[in-house]
Image (cartoon, helix red, strand yellow):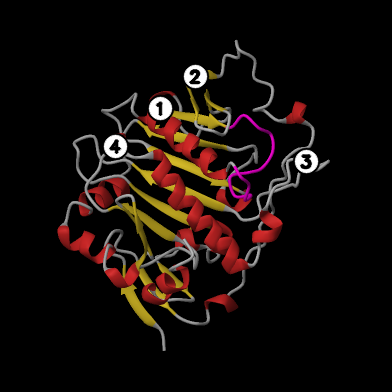
């Protein structure tokens, strides 16, 4: 017997059924991390490279820097797309390695800095790893998308986040995975895939108040839990002494961090998505079926993150 539920944030309807894993899955064709650094567009930047944007962060994972997107999804009258780029041509942001939390801290700190330069504009802070997440280059990087107008769905979601009933539904205890640093990891009422989580500040916060280190710790906790649940933790560890690059991301993910609206409505919040586990054609369908209903989904992650 399947159970239907509606996401209070998006209005999307979900159908919970134990048969989701039997649906056909498109095989993800992963983007390999090129072994020849001369072919990597992020490894050949000189101090006078015209693509560079002012701003950098050093938080224990080298010097992360900013640059214009080579193939911008937004440009000119439609807005801006700015990349944050890691210093090392090596492990992705989903390989488990000693500096992974510092790397994610650097990503969020620089993205926060870049988004703050246009306070009257709305920004989507996004980091995609792997082909199914839409990343065409596996060198560690993320981006800040600042469209000229707020997308209607984003405006709707942020205004709904100002509704106490919506927040109560999203933050209910039976959907909670972990609480720390004023943040809650929750099982979404209607995820796109069976390993997705939401990250929400328990108090209303603008993006400028985000603590990059705290967010990084929650994201890395989620990544470790995903690797544990999949049994991929051992082969996801990156060996910096290895003779060859270890190739693609061991798991494809997307972290979408939404800023509040320019008028202060809403709060920042993040979607944590394991993209290759999403149902085929999910973007075109409002009805999504997954293995676990929210409470069981939360219980599966609880204690691991």
Q: Which residue is mark 3?
A: 241
Residue 54 location, x and y as percent?
47, 17
Is 119 placed above or below 126 here? above
Residue position marked by numbered label 2 in the rendering: 53
Q: Secondary structure at mark 3?
A: loop
| Label 3: few (<14), some (14–19) or many (≥20) C-alpha neighbours in 10 Å | few
Residue at 68%, 26% in the rendered image = 43
Comes first in the chain, label 4 or label 3: 4
Q: Which residue is label 4 attached to?
A: 209
Q: Position of residue 5 (x, y in %)?
A: 32, 74
Quarter-of-image position of residue 287:
bottom left
**Label 2 near label 3: C-beta < 8 Å?**
no
User: Which quarter of the figure has residue 2?
Assistant: bottom left
CA–CA distance in space, label 2 to label 1: 9 Å
Return the disc, 3 or 1, that comes first in the chain's sequence.
1
Crowding at dot 1, Cα within 10 Å, few <14 / some 14-19 / many 20+, comes out as: many
The residue beneath circle 1 is 114
**Mark 4 surroundings within 10 Å by alpha-carbon count, few (fewer than 14), some (14 through 19), many (20 or more):** few
Q: Residue at x 53, y 56 (%)?
A: 223
Please give the range of residues in magenta.
Answer: 86-98
Q: Residue furthest bottom?
A: 1
Task: Mark 4 vs mark 1: give the one in front.
Answer: 4
- Counting residues from the start of the chain, the first of labels 4 and 1 encountered is 1
Residue 301: image location, x then y, percent: 46, 68
Give the percent coordinates (x, y) of residue 160.
22, 54
Q: Is residue 88 magenta?
A: yes
């Amino acid at each position: 017997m399947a159970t239907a539920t509606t996401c209070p944030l998006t209005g999307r309807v979900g159908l919970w059924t134990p048969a989701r894993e039997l649906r056909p899955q498109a095989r993800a064709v992963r983007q390999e991390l090129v072994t020849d650094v001369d072919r990597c567009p992020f490894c050949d930047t000189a101090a006078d490279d015209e693509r560079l944007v002012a701003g950098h962060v050093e938080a224990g994972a080298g010097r992360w820097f900013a640059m214009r997107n080579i193939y911008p999804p937004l440009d000119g009258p439609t807005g801006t797309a700015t990349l944050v780029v890691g210093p090392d041509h090596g492990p992705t942001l989903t390989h488990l390695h000693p500096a992974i939390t510092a790397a994610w801290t650097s990503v969020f700190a620089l993205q926060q800095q870049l988004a703050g330069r246009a306070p009257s504009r709305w920004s989507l802070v996004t980091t995609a790893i792997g082909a199914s997440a839409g990343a065409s280059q596996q060198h560690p990087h993320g981006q800040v998308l600042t469209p000229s107008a707020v997308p209607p769905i984003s405006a709707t979601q942020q205004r709904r986040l100002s509704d106490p009933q919506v927040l109560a539904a999203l933050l209910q205890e039976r959907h909670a995975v972990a609480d720390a640093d004023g943040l809650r990891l929750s099982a979404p009422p209607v995820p796109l895939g069976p390993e997705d989580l939401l990250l929400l500040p328990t108090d209303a916060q603008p993006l400028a108040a985000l603590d990059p280190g705290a967010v990084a710790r929650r994201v890395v906790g989620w990544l470790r839990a995903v690797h544990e649940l999949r049994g991929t933790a051992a082969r996801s560890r990156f060996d910096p002494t290895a003779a060859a690059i270890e190739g693609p991301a061991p798991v494809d993910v997307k972290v979408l961090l939404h800023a509040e609206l320019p008028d202060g409505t809403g709060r920042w919040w993040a979607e944590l998505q394991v993209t290759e586990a999403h149902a085929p054609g999910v973007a075109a369908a409002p009805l999504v079926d997954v293995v676990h209903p929210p409470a069981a989904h939360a219980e599966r992650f609880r204690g691991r993150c």
